Image (cartoon, rainbow, N blue to C red):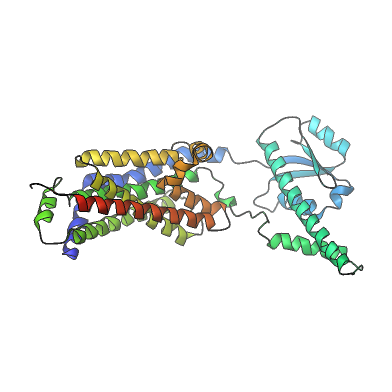
């Protein structure tokens, strides 16, 4: 009976035009609109190379971190080049700034830096941010070197090779987690959050499939449900086979979305394909569990349940940043509990963490959150279905 109902449910789902639209066609259409809307914006907002000046005095010449960092960031052969750097005297730097030939200039001190601007803007912000990050790294290396020197002195070793200690500290910073890992250069496209949310929305729309499957098992909703209620077959067998069919259909829809966005729209999801697929599979379970919950709890007709499910999903997508990227950050900052419980945000955040962080801690926290969400909703649904009784059919 399990196999028979599985095949029957699968055929029913794929024959429904409404289900095919919401779970297969709608995400593809929305993805196309995203691509058309953001492609021109992305190209127009790419950073140009920024003209800057650095005061080439003894402090700068003796600071290997600043010298190497700005050499790399200004290298013509570097595809991620940020700056066009002029190494000049302080008087020359002031003149260049007054003539607006540079956006600002940098003066390196012993433990600090001076940044001079005459106006504000994104170029000045990038220059300031890069300089401050390099300063932080420089100070870390200096502190490590001082600690190593103290250890040598405490061990009565006064024949200290300062250059060797500095090189050792520099190497430790490069290997340590404190190093600035530039792993997201290829993914700094802020519009990717829209495609992440699109994947999350597609996962949650799988709930429409499970909602339909559950409705077909309820005697007060469908004729099939009446037959199920009076048949000797265990309801658990019918429900599980129906959910498995729903999950298979949902995975097919998700696979179509990935193939379409990658090969047609040219979206780059990075190199973590296994983790992306895993998150999609678990996110689909969360979507199915939401459909089961609404199908078992709500005492209304199928169209009303579908409308409520779509409304819940779209609200979750809104809070996760689908209709305005800033909304996700506003919610995270002011009412974080909403997105902590929002499965759309969990999926989006899991995808986001793969490309902007060099560890998987945040990714697996979202995986765990989705699993807990799924289990809780399934348990509530099972309890609700067990309590359902009918005076007459």
Q: Is residue 268 left or right of residue 371?
A: right
**Quarter occupied by residue 338:** top left
Q: Residue at x 26, y 41 (%)?
A: 306
Q: Is residue 253 left or right of residue 97?
A: left
Residue at left 38%, top 57%? 281
Q: Residue 371 location in percent, x, y? A: 39, 56
Where residue 47 appears, as percent x and y from the top left, is 63, 41
- From this viewpoint, is residue 33 visible? no
User: Foreground residue, 383 or 367?
Assistant: 383
Nearest to the observer: residue 366 or residue 194: 366
Looking at the rendering, which quadrant does residue 238 occupy?
Answer: bottom left
- Residue 250 percent across, percent down from the top left: 31, 54
Residue 130 placement (x, y as % from top left)? 70, 45
- The image shows residue 379, relative to residue 299, as above or below, that is below
User: Is 281 drawn above or below residue 322 in the view shown?
Assistant: below
Residue sitting at the far right: 158
Q: Nearer the viewer, residue 316 or 65?
A: 316
């Amino acid at each position: 009976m399990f196999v028979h109902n599985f095949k029957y449910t699968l055929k029913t789902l794929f024959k429904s035009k409404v289900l095919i639209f919401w779970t297969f066609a709608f995400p593809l259409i929305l993805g196309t609109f995203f691509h058309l809307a953001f492609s021109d914006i992305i190209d127009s907002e790419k950073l140009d190379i920024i003209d800057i000046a650095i005061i080439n005095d003894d402090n700068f010449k003796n600071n290997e971190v600043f010298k190497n960092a700005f050499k790399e960031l200004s290298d013509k052969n570097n595809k991620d080049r940020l700056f066009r750097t002029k190494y000049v005297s302080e008087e020359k730097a002031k003149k260049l700034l007054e003539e607006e030939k540079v956006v600002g200039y940098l003066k390196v001190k012993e433990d600090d830096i001076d940044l001079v601007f005459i106006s504000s803007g994104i170029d000045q912000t990038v220059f300031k941010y890069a300089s401050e990050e390099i300063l932080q790294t420089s100070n870390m290396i200096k502190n490590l070197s001082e600690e190593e020197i103290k250890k040598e002195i405490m061990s009565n070793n006064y024949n200290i090779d300062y250059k060797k200690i500095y090189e050792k500290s520099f190497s430790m910073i490069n290997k340590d987690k404190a190093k600035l890992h530039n792993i997201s250069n290829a993914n700094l496209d802020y519009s990717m959050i829209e495609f992440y949310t699109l994947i999350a929305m597609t996962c949650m729309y799988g709930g429409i499939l499970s909602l339909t499957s559950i409705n077909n098992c309820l005697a007060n909703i469908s004729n099939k449900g009446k037959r199920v209620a009076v048949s000797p077959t265990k309801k658990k067998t019918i429900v599980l086979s129906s959910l498995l069919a729903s999950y298979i259909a949902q995975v097919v829809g998700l696979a179509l979305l990935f193939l379409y966005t990658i090969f047609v729209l040219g979206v780059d999801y990075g190199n973590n394909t296994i983790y992306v697929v895993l998150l999609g599979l678990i996110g689909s379970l969360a979507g199915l569990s939401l459909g089961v919950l609404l199908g078992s709890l709500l005492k209304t007709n199928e169209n009303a349940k579908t409308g409520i499910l779509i409304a819940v999903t779209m609200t979750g997508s809104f809070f996760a940043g689908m209709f305005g990227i800033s909304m996700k950050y506003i919610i995270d900052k002011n009412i974080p509990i909403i997105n902590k419980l929002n499965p759309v945000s969990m999926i989006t955040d899991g995808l986001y963490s793969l490309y902007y962080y060099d560890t998987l801690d945040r990714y697996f926290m979202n995986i765990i959150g989705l699993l807990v969400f799924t289990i809780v909703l399934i348990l509530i649904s099972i309890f609700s279905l067990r309590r359902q009784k009918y005076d007459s059919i």
